[in-house]
Image (cartoon, helix red, strand yellow):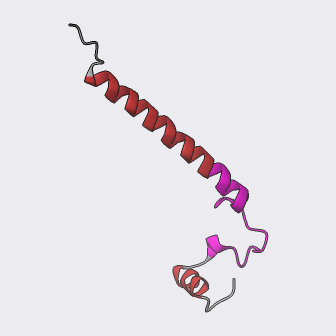
Amino acid sequence: MSVHTRAPGRTLAIATVVGTVATLGYMYVAGVQTKKEEGPASVYNQSKGLNNETNDTRMSSADVRQTVQGDKKP
C-alpha cells in the first residue's frame, strides 16, 4: 500500500509564502488607510499652520518638549 504525502519542506515553503503575502497585504492596506486619515504629511514639507519662525524643524528640544506638553503654542 502506497501513501502519497508531501515533503515537510514543501509544506513549510507554502506556509512561508502565504504568511509573507498576507503580511505584505496587511501592510499595504494599513499604509493606504493611514494616508487617507493623515493626508500626504511629510517631515520634509512645512506644515500649513507654521511659518518660518514657528517651523518645528527650527525648534530646540526644549521648545518641542514645551509644545508637546501643552505649555507653549507653536
Residue at position x 43%, y 30% from top? 17
**Where is residue 65, by image quadrant?**
bottom right
Relative to 51, does residue 17 appear above or below in the rendering? above
Magenta stretch encompasses residue 39: yes
**Where is residue 51, by image quadrant?**
bottom right
Image side of residue 1 versus residue 45, left or right? left
**Where is residue 11, by image quadrant?**
top left
Q: Main secondary structure of the magenta part?
A: loop
Relative to 72, does residue 1 appear above or below in the rendering? above
Q: Nearer the viewer, residue 10 or 46?
A: 10
Q: Quadrant of the C terminus?
A: bottom right
Relative to 12, does residue 67 appear above or below in the rendering? below
Image side of residue 39 versus residue 10, left or right? right
Residue at position x 72%, y 56% from top? 36
Residue at position x 28%, y 12% from top? 4
Query: Which range of residues does the magenta coloring cover?
Result: 31-58
Q: Position of residue 73 (x, y in %)?
A: 69, 87
Magenta stretch encompasses residue 61: no
Residue at the left extreme, as displayed: 1
Q: Is residue 40 visible?
A: no
Q: Nearer the viewer, residue 52 or 20?
A: 20
Q: Is residue 47 visible?
A: yes
Q: Quadrant of the N terminus?
A: top left
Q: Position of residue 58 (x, y in %)?
A: 63, 74
Residue at the bottom extreme, as displayed: 71
